[in-house]
């Protein structure tokens, strides 16, 4: 897109570029790779979230009283996460211990 010298503010001239078959194939492959990467990242984020909540349930139980949040895992299972464990978790570098972020 190129700007045109005009007395009309914000007027743009659109231009097209004809792609070769090889360029189209390369762009299509890169687009597929990006979409698959985004889907993979989304799955990994859901798995990470589920894993963190399942760790809390496994170690603290699923019957919190007082401050808690009911969380639905991607499997459909609803778990009760006690405060302050219902937010993000911090892990030690060696992943031997976890702490609630707002502890």
Image (cartoon, rainbow, N blue to C red):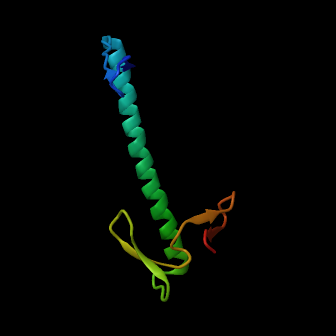
In this view of the protein, which residue sits in the foreground, 12 or 35?
12
Residue 30: x percent and y percent? Answer: 40, 27
Image-quadrant location for residue 70: bottom left
Image quarter of the N terminus: top left
The residue that appears at 63% across and 70% down in the rendered structure is 99
Against 93, residue 4 (above or below) is above
Against 57, residue 34 (above or below) is above
Against 56, residue 1 (above or below) is above
In this view of the protein, which residue sits in the foreground, 97 or 6?
6
Image-quadrant location for residue 31: top left
The residue that appears at 31% across and 16% down in the rendered structure is 15
The residue that appears at 67% across and 64% down in the rendered structure is 96
Q: Is residue 77 left or right of residue 86?
A: left
Residue 75: x percent and y percent? Answer: 34, 64
Residue 73: x percent and y percent? Answer: 39, 66
In this view of the protein, which residue sits in the foreground, 91 or 4?
4
Question: Residue most toward the bottom?
Answer: 65
């Amino acid at each position: 897109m190129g700007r045109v010298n005009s007395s009309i503010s914000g007027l743009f001239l659109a231009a097209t570029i004809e792609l070769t078959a090889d360029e189209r194939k390369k762009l299509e492959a890169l687009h597929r790779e990006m979409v698959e990467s985004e889907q993979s990242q989304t799955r990994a984020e859901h798995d990470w979230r589920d894993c963190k909540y399942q760790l809390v349930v496994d170690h603290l139980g699923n019957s919190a009283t007082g401050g808690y949040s009911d969380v639905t895992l991607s499997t459909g299972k609803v778990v009760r996460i006690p405060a302050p464990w219902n937010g993000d978790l911090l892990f030690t570098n060696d992943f031997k211990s976890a702490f609630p972020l707002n502890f």
